[in-house]
């Protein structure tokens, strides 16, 4: 089905679609990969900003709280620890600063930063709200202790009192709890980032696989739509080469392959038609050659068996001479036709008497058509520059063709007239007729004509060679049917 | 009994007609010559009783070959055989087209023609 649809699409477009699909998949893969890289970079930044820095600050705060607790122990003096009020106040101030930073930057439970809101959502989605409650409780305890510590402050110093001794451990334990909670947060965040990276891998893998499979399928469809048709074409070409049989190439597509198929069809048909024309030409040529050979062979046999019978010897020799001339003319015709087809036609112009050439040619052709009357109106001493041998052959072809067209009971009107620039030889065949198709057929290379008109059936070689000879001279050959007969006009420049 | 001593050759090639005429002269058989079918039919109608064999060419001016053959057969009747004598490359096909059983391909050997002339006697 898809293959049939593809038949309607050109080969170039099919390949374009294939490449476009591959490009789209590549673009999608790159875009997806870039997106995931960006997300991973964001996650890394988030881990550093929201998880790692908070744990580090908590560690620092825990150290301060532990120092405060140690310095404010009742037995601190005995242990050799000195607790100046300014140092105690400084530690309380550090813890206060940490409290502010934690609430504004790292608190998950009630934080308003984008990181806090996002992470809180993830925690709730995982069903770990107890962690948030634990953080809230620790923050509450820490803030209460900080407030208690700050109340003891006096002019930038804090003396160690019982209240200080009571609040310091509370602050330290609260920070310890916050540290535990945040470490747990970091573990969860790390798992989330790892999970996201794994998802990215899976998505990229899925896109890559889907792209590969669809490209493969598309390629198979294109192949199915092209390869069998190419194989069919090749098969037909091989059969034509091996058997010479023209099998019509039926390709329902309208793409380049169908165009190629049609071109092959046309080419094969033309070759086959040319072969048929050549076969027909050879058949007619064989017929034309066999006619004089029949006389030559027959009269030679008569001479061989009756060499002393004077009543037949002279006629036999005369006939052999005439038919030998006709045979040589036919062979010359074949030779010239072959040379013309192979592009080795020689043109050797020289000045000559065209009138004499026409009269001589007519005299040579007359014995072959003894019942044919020739009406002659030839202007004398028409000279011209040309290849007289070629023109003589052209005139012989023309007379032969005109005689074949003639019914024999009406004269052939032969006329030669010249102007300053050209010589016009006309042969009129009264009573003959030729359709436009017949006239066209006269000029087909290797063509022949087989007339089946009211004149019966005649066969002769066509006028292709005659016209080519005229064209080499810069002249032309026209054949026309004026209704009352056929007129051959041979115009040659002087 | 009718003595058929003549042969009719219908061929537009004068040289071929002349050859057959000379051969007839050598073998002592009269040869009537016609350049086309119409002339041949006239001779046949005139000398039907004397003609023992008709030699008919295929490519000729005048009537169509098929019409010519039919007219000759109708005029000659079954007693005078008609033999196609042609230089065509497919004489058997041409003979079948003209509904003729015998044909001679040009160029022919004298002995073939002599046998034909004598068989038809």
Image: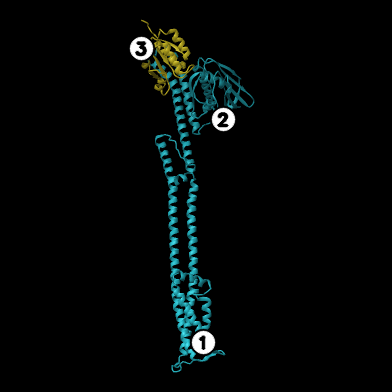
- The spot of residue A16 in percent (x, y) is 50, 50
Q: Identify the disc placed on residue A272.
A: none
**Which chain has been coloured cyan in this picture?**
A
Relative height, residue A457 to residue A474 (above, below): above
Residue A205 falls left or right of residue A86: left
Which residue has dot 1 on it? A149
Nearer the N terminus, badge 2 or badge 1? Answer: 1
Q: Quadrant of the N terminus of chain A?
A: top left
- Chain under numbered label 2: A
Disc 1 secondary structure class? helix
Q: Is residue A114 visible?
A: yes
Q: Residues within 10 Å of mark 2 (few under 14, many from 20)?
A: some
Tell me the residue at 49%/50% (across/down).
A17
- Label 3–label 2 contact, CB within 8 A: no
In the rendered image, the residue lying farthest to the bottom is A78
Q: Nearer the viewer, mark 1 or mark 3?
A: 1
Q: Are marks 2 and 1 on the same chain?
A: yes
Q: Is residue A310 visible?
A: no
Tell me the residue at 46%/37% (across/down).
A265
**Chain B: what color?**
yellow
- Label 2–label 1 contact, CB within 8 A: no
Which residue has dot 3 on it? B118
> Rounded to the nearest whole Å, what is the CA distance between mark 2 and mark 1?
125 Å
The image quadrant that residue A181 belongs to is: bottom left
Q: Are marks 3 and 2 on the same chain?
A: no
Which residue has dot 2 on it? A471
């Amino acid at each position: 089905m898809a293959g049939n649809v593809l038949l309607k699409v050109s080969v170039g477009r099919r390949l374009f679609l294939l490449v476009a699909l591959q490009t789209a998949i590549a673009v999608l893969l790159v875009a997806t990969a870039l997106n995931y890289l960006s997300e991973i970079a964001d996650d890394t930044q988030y881990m550093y900003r929201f998880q790692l820095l908070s744990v580090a600050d908590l560690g620092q705060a825990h150290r301060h709280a532990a120092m405060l607790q140690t310095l404010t122990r009742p037995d601190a003096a005995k242990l050799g620890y000195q607790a100046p009020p300014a140092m105690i106040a400084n530690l309380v101030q550090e813890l206060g600063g940490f409290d502010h930073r934690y609430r504004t930057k790292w608190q998950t439970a009630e934080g308003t930063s984008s990181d806090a809101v996002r992470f809180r959502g993830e925690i709730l989605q995982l069903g770990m709200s107890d962690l948030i409650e634990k953080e809230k409780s620790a923050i509450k305890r820490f803030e209460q202790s900080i407030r208690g510590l700050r109340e003891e402050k006096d002019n930038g110093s804090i003396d160690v009192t019982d209240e200080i001794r009571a609040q310091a451990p509370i602050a330290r334990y609260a920070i310890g709890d916050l540290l535990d909670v945040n470490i747990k947060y970091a573990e969860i965040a790390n798992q989330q980032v790892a999970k996201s990276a794994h998802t990215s891998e899976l998505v990229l893998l899925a896109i890559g696989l889907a792209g590969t499979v669809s490209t493969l399928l598309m390629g198979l469809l294109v192949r199915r739509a092209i390869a069998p048709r190419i194989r069919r074409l090749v098969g037909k070409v091989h059969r034509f080469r091996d058997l010479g049989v023209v099998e019509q190439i039926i390709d329902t597509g309208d793409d380049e392959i169908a165009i190629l198929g049609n071109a092959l069809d046309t080419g094969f048909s033309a070759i086959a038609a040319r072969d048929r024309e050549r076969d027909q030409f050879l058949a007619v040529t064989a017929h034309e050659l066999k006619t004089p050979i029949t006389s030559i062979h027959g009269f030679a046999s008569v001479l061989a068996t009756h060499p002393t019978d004077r009543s037949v010897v002279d006629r036999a020799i005369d006939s052999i001479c005439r038919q030998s001339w006709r045979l040589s003319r036919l062979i010359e015709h074949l030779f010239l036709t072959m040379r013309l087809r192979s592009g080795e036609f020689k043109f050797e112009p020289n000045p000559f008497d065209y009138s004499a050439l026409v009269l001589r040619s007519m005299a040579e052709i007359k014995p072959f058509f003894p019942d044919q009357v020739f009406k002659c109106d030839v202007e004398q001493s028409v000279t011209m520059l040309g290849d007289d041998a070629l023109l003589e052959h052209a005139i012989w072809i023309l007379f032969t063709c005109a005689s074949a067209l003639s019914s024999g009971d009406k004269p052939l009107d032969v006329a030669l007239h010249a102007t300053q620039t050209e010589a016009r030889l006309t042969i009129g065949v009264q009573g003959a007729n030729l359709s436009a198709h017949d006239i066209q057929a006269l000029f087909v290379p290797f063509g022949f004509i087989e007339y089946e008109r009211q004149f019966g059936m005649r066969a002769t070689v066509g006028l292709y060679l005659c016209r080519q000879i005229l064209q080499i001279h810069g002249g032309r050959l026209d054949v026309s049917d004026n209704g009352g007969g056929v007129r051959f006009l041979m115009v040659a420049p002087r | 009994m009718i003595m058929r001593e003549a042969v009719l050759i219908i061929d537009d090639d004068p040289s071929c007609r002349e050859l057959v005429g000379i051969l007839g002269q050598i073998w002592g058989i009269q040869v009537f010559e016609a350049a086309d079918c119409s002339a041949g039919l006239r001779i046949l109608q005139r000398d039907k009783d004397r003609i023992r064999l008709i030699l008919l060419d295929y490519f000729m001016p005048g009537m169509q070959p098929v019409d010519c053959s039919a007219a000759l057969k109708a005029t000659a009747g079954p007693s005078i055989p008609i033999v196609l004598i042609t230089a065509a490359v497919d004489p058997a096909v041409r003979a079948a087209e003209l509904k003729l059983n015998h044909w001679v391909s040009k160029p022919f050997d004298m002995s073939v023609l002599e046998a034909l002339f004598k068989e038809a006697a």
